Image: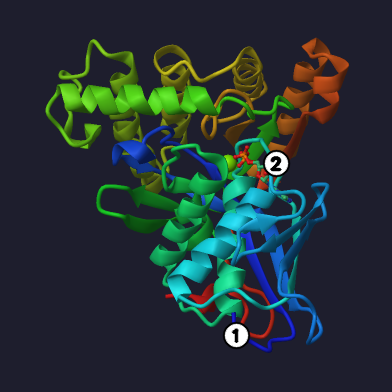
Amino acid sequence: MSSAKALTHWRAPGRVNLIGDHTDYAQGLALPLAIDRDCSITVVPRPAGAKGSIRAVSKEFAGEVTITTSTRATTSGGEGWGRFVIAAAELVQSLNSHPVNEAIDITVSSTVPAGSGLSSSSALSVALVGALAEYSSLPLSKSELAKAAHQVEERATGVPSGLMDQLASVNGEVDHALLIDFAAELVTPVKWPNDLAIIVINSGMLRALKDSEYAQRREEVENAARQLGLDSLRLATKKQVADNPWARHVVSENERVLAFVSALQSGSYDDLGLIMGKSHASLRDDFLVSTPELNELVANLIAVGAIGARLTGAGFGGCVVALAKPDRADEIAQEALARYRQGASPAIGASAHAFRVRAVAGAGPVGERDNSSGLQ
Ligand code: ADP
Ligand code: MG
């Protein structure tokens, strides 16, 4: 990296997905939004003469990572979150064809809860790639940044995830959800109405260690497409997949994304709720990625007056998302959470929490050239 910058500072938001889960790797549709919780990365050069290595610390995660990228040697913390730093440094180096031989300090700090399905991992990957690319004067378009961050995440975790999280983090827009068409690689902002509040409740059950089940779901979906002689399930009809629950989920979920956007645009909020309910049922009964805790939170939210609720993200734990009228949203969230805590173990009850989110701008540099204008 060849720069004398005093400080490079990037932020990248997490995301919540309103509808369209387990569709991204099937060339389908989804409607996430970038949320007002983000990962912040600073890159600072160490004084001249310091040994050439990258050092990284995280405010939330223990361990210091020290990487000499030319030899790929890691002196500590190379497992776990350090793998994201190594993968990002190597990827930026490979795109830039410059050896990373400068001594830099990286600091990570994040307000995205880790392991909850709000994509703290993609916020971290996008912010790391964005900051390291800027530091080494490597221009990246939004699409290149999202794909580079996706590669970093795949290398760091080995999970064959889709591109939704990185695209949402990069393309976020204030007060807009993002309709993503993964086949066309098209992101269309959809205005979010100001009379509809978005609630997230974290079940307190980490979704970590379910990576093998995620890979298995993806394999089922890809097998189903192959059996139909298709590249992906995007062009499959409901009739073609009627007997295959994995494929049935994907095909019906794509339809629900479009129906949700229509209902949003016509102000049919009752329909939004019905569509979210069907999505949750499909993830629970056909795709088998829900948990008793997520089911209970969804039921509680509806019982206390939410317009709609469903699990969000890959499932297997993590968060639910719900919609409510803004003047009742806090009360609904707290009441649903209180009921959930009554039946939960003290440990789960203590880590469960509810909060409201809003749609914010996508990833970018922080400071003079403030974020949303930083990328094409
Ligand atoms: P999610 O993306 O849903 O939050 P993941 O299991 O995909 O859950 O990603 C969580 C992982 O991302 C953590 O185990 C850690 O490796 C990394 N990570 C997230 N936030 C931070 C952070 N603030 N500092 C360091 N690593 C982080
Ligand atoms: Mg993740």
Q: What residue type is labelled 2?
A: Ala
Q: Residue at x 80, y 21 (%)?
A: 348
The nearer-to-camera label among 1 and 2 is: 1
For label 1, the residue is 2
**Residue 90 picture location, percent across and down:** 54, 62
Horizontal side of residue 250 vs 291, given as left or right = left
Which image quadrant for residue 333? top right
- Residue 111: x, y in percent? 74, 52
Residue drawn at (62%, 79%) of the image: 370
* Front residue of 295 and 41: 41
User: Amino acid under label 1?
Assistant: Ser
Tell me, yes or no, if residue 152 can be seen here: yes
Rendered location of residue 65, percent (x, y): 75, 56
Q: Indicate the secondary structure of the residue bearing disc 1.
A: loop
The quadrant the N terminus occupies is bottom right
Q: Can you tell me whether the CB of the residue at mark 2 lies under 8 Å from the nearest atom of ligand 1?
A: yes
Q: Distance between the residues labelled 1 and 2?
A: 32 Å
| Residue 312: image location, x then y, percent | 54, 33
**Within 10 Å of the Cα at label 2, are there few (<14), some (14-19), or many (20+) other Cα atoms?**
some
Q: Which of 199 and 266 is in front in this view?
A: 199
The correct choice, above or below, for 344 with respect to 108 in the image is above
Ligand 2 sits in which quadrant?
A: top right
Q: In which quarter of the image is residue 224?
A: top left
Residue 114's label in the rendered image is 2
Which numbered disc, 1 or 2, marks the residue that appears first in the sequence?
1
Q: In this view, does 239 lie above or below 263?
A: above
Left or right: where does residue 37 sit relative to residue 247? right
